[in-house]
Image (cartoon, rainbow, N blue to C red):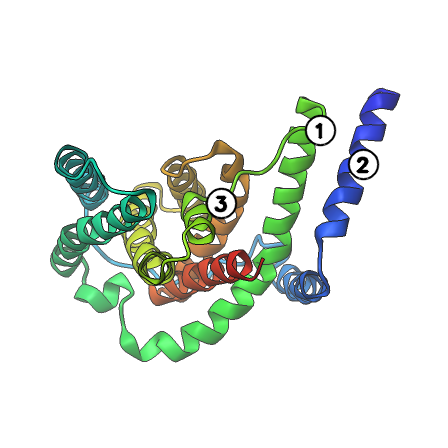
Amino acid sequence: MTIVDISQLTKAVAELASQASIVDLIVCIGGVLVLAVWLLKTSLGTKALVDSPPRRNDMPLHLAIIPLLMWFGVVLGLDFIREKMLAGLSDWQSALADNVILCIGVAPAVAASMIIARSSFARRLKGFGLNPRTIVRDLGAGFLNLLATMPVVLAVIILTTLIGKLATGGEFEMPRHEELKEIMAYPQWQVRALIIVTMILIVPLAEEIFFRGMLQTSLRSFIVRPWPAIIFASLIFVMFHENPEHWPALFALSVCLGYSYEKSGSLFRPILIHSMFNALSVFAALVQ
């Protein structure tokens, strides 16, 4: 590394540190402590899933990806119709329409997932991980899982930013998620309310059903061992998201989501973790 590179690195570190708040520090310290306890109890994670409950099912891999393809297909079809029929919308109305289409498009795909799960899992939807009796327990455990993961996610974001700044001579900026840009750009209550519902309720529910419940379960049945299934499902998960700059942090989060599903056998746990993570992102965007 040259002297110029060191100077750029020092400047980038100082800039990132200046953006951190006392809340960020408290969250990181708490998360590091929870993560350290987990690492000690699980022999650095090697024994974390030795007792993970099996999800007996006969769902083939090709059937598991049908709802995901259905979701994207319906959304693309509706978006094409909107562009042809509602081309004169203002920017905020277009953002509102995009989120309406996303919510509408997910409904048939989730319904298809429920039908497949009921017919493929030994205990039907409970075997799939949708047992309402576990929600309270999943909420507490999910919070601890997310707390332990946040330092890792933040560290990956910082590392990605530093690498980007070094590669571009300090001009790199981590792009915001499109929904977060819209919620900051448009003050109309209709847009903000729908984005909040979409990010905190609709997207976590749909993505965890598709990527964890369907895809990861099918991969687990094919690969047998849980960690490779979690990693493969996480790789596919991140590639379905825009902005490759976000992929490393999303991968870290996705591994947490996949682990929580395998450890608990409950799909509500990764749904709640995903929802809490998105809620924090929305809150941070609104208070800026």
Q: How many marks?
A: 3
Q: Secondary structure at mark 2?
A: helix
For mark 1, give the secondary structure.
loop
Whether pointer 1 and pointer 2 mark residues with C-beta atoms closer than 8 Å, the reply is yes
Q: What amino acid does circle 3 point to?
A: Leu
Q: Nearer the viewer, residue 225 or 183?
A: 183
Query: What residue do we see at 21% from left, 51% from top?
Result: 106
Q: Quadrant of the N terminus?
A: top right
Image height of 64 relative to 262, above or below:
above
Q: Residue at x 20, y 38 (%)?
A: 79
Report the residue at 43% width, 53% height from top.
183
Task: State the CA–CA distance, disc 3 to disc 2.
Answer: 26 Å
Q: Which circle, 1 or 3, is nearer the viewer?
A: 1
Q: Identify the image quadrant of residue 238.
A: top left
Residue type at numbered disc 1:
Gly
Mark toward the start of the polypeptide (1 vs 3): 1
Q: Residues within 10 Å of mark 2 (few under 14, many from 20)?
A: some
Per the image, the residue denoted by label 2 is: 11
Q: Which residue is the site of mark 1? A: 170
Q: Spatial distance from mark 1 to mark 3, Cα to Cα?
A: 23 Å
The image shows residue 70 at horizontal and vertical percentages of 17, 42
Amino acid beneath label 2? Lys
| Mark 1, other Cα within 10 Å: few <14 / some 14–19 / many ≥20 | some
Residue picked out by circle 3: 250
Where residue 98 appears, as percent x and y from the top left, is: 27, 45
39 relative position to 136: left or right:
right
